Amino acid sequence: DASAGRRFASAPERGRAAVAALERVGAFAKQDALGLAVLSVEVDRVTRGAAESDDPALSRQKADWEAIKLYQAWQIETGSPDLVVQVVDTGIDVDHPDLAQNIWVNEGEICDNGIDDDDNGFVDDCHGWTWSLPGGGEKDVMDRNSHGTHCAGTVAAVTNNGIGVAGVAGGAGAGGVKLMAAKTLGDSGTGYSSDAARALIYGADNGARVSSNSRGATYVSCSNSFHDNAIDYFNEEGGILVFAAGNDGRDGEHHYPGCHPDVVGVGAVQQTGVRASWSNYGSVVDISAPGVSIYSTVPESKGSYGYKSGTSMACPHVAGTLALGWSANASAPKEDLLACLYGTATDILALNPDHLVGAGMVDAAAFLACVMGQAFPTDQPTHAPTHAPTDAPTHAPYELGVLGANDCPAGTAPVECVEECREAAVPYLELEPPASENDGGYPKGCYRYHGSFTVEYTFWNDHDEGKKHTLSQPICRDASLASPCGPSEAPTEAPTDEPPDYALAEAGTTACPTGYERVSCLDECRDDAAESLSLSYEKHDIWAAYPQGCFLWNDNMYWNLHGGSAEPNSQLVCRAVGVRSSCEGSTDAPTDAPTDAPT
């Protein structure tokens, strides 16, 4: 403009000037031969990047977003509401104020009218579906765990809305990509692969182009035929599947489904690019992303926001980045997106010389530039590793033992104190601390029972009409690691609803505790009670006076650890009422009664 004053003209004046300019261009296009080359005229807008976002907790995400160059990527694309990302997890808090705007809505369904309006086989599936309940499904996708909501927030928490955090593809205040909820993991965080397979088919059939899956387990081989078919189906529909690589701290070649060759397996690194010590590596990892102390959304009932770590947290970084790619270039073939994803990753091999971390750490800015410029690299990394790791650990620092038993895997040992369970094992294993101390049965969280520490899980049983069963798994530590526990600890949190099968009465008494009855034969005392109570002694049949171990006297079964004392140190052995006695039909004679007991 000739006049500097025009730069600061009022909005109406700028608007009139713009209309006049467009009219002149239109006239030029109609009257001038050269003007026929003008195909269209659009406003060339200045893009507002999320680096200017007003999300108050963005500072807590700054290191993560800088690591993957997300601020630069947002200058190109922030996420389109036409792109749907499926989150297969514990559900999503669809009412969360930092997520609600970006929750997928099934436009073909009239919510809560009890009719399958779109005829897709799911009644009232307004925001997704739940497969984690008996009977195969439910419209309620609410997350009561927090894992799924955390992952969803990383993908697409609403950006630049003045509250909370920003998602990778959360838009710029006007809404970003849409989040489809697929709840296949129950409130305890566990579920069945068959349900997850059904969820993938649902996602493909209902418009999801990217599926984020922060789940998996170690299989004998990297295969599950039913789930493999669902992976094939989603891929054939043109979508991209993203999976967490697992948190075992070893080669994840059998961590399924992340190890499947036709999915994107994601490992976790620190913001510096160094592999997180617990992240799996090797052929399961196609690309890596930040996964340490990630700040994101959690259900409002659990505080609305929180930190979590794991490959589960790395996975949605990549899913969100892929969503940005298709938001920027909706017609790009998936093969081109994957080629750009791998070909533009930041090289972190020098930081991780002994471990395969895939193509590198995701670079959202370079990826988008590649997608928009159609400069797709031709040297896409293969899924197979090029060299074997040299120092794969035998065990992760912590792992769960056998469900419903007090057995730890070979090479591991039971955790010995509540503090280690709560402060070390639970954060490492990403176990959600309980909201309450007790739920009418065994304590929630870490508790001591029969000498080991366990974390409670509540499962649904398809064969018992939905009745809730409480099962526990031992917390186990790599046997090569020293215990941080003190020398001893009292079991302050015993289960409250099921007494031990056996108990000892107070020394010198002849009455069992309330709820118990007397054991009456040697075999039950030696074989059942001694094992249940972890009783042991120096095996001498007679030591001066009272026998050590189990002995029958006056039709009562006693346990004596101290043999030889002048006064009785024996304790009556008692069985919980309702526990079947192994003495039934026994005719044991008191073959080792004391020889000089007082009358």
Image: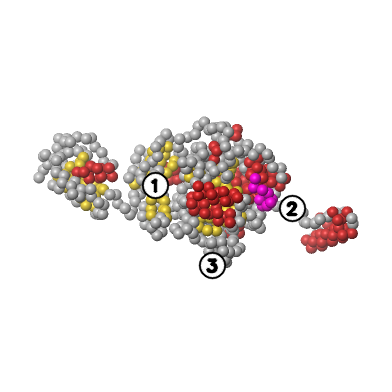
Q: Looking at the picture, which amino acid does disc 2 mark?
A: Val
Q: CA distance from mark 3 to mark 1?
A: 40 Å
Specify whether residue 281 is in view: yes
Residue closest to the eye, 241 or 497:
241
Q: CA distance from mark 3 to mark 2?
A: 45 Å
Residue 273, percent across and down?
59, 38
Q: Residues within 10 Å of mark 3 (few under 14, many from 20)?
A: some
Residue 53, percent across and down?
65, 52
Residue 533, percent across and down?
28, 44
Query: In front of the other: label 2 or label 1?
Result: 1
Earlier along the polypeptide chain: callout 2 or callout 1?
Answer: 2
Up-down relation of residue 397 to residue 85 (above or below): above
Dot 3 falls on a residue whose secondary structure is: loop
Dot 2 falls on a residue whose secondary structure is: loop
- The numbered mark at residue 46 is 2
User: Residue at the location (72% across, 45% down)?
Assistant: 373
Q: Is residue 302 left or right of residue 595?
A: right
Q: Is residue 46 left or right of residue 337?
A: right
Up-down relation of residue 488 to residue 34 (above or below): above
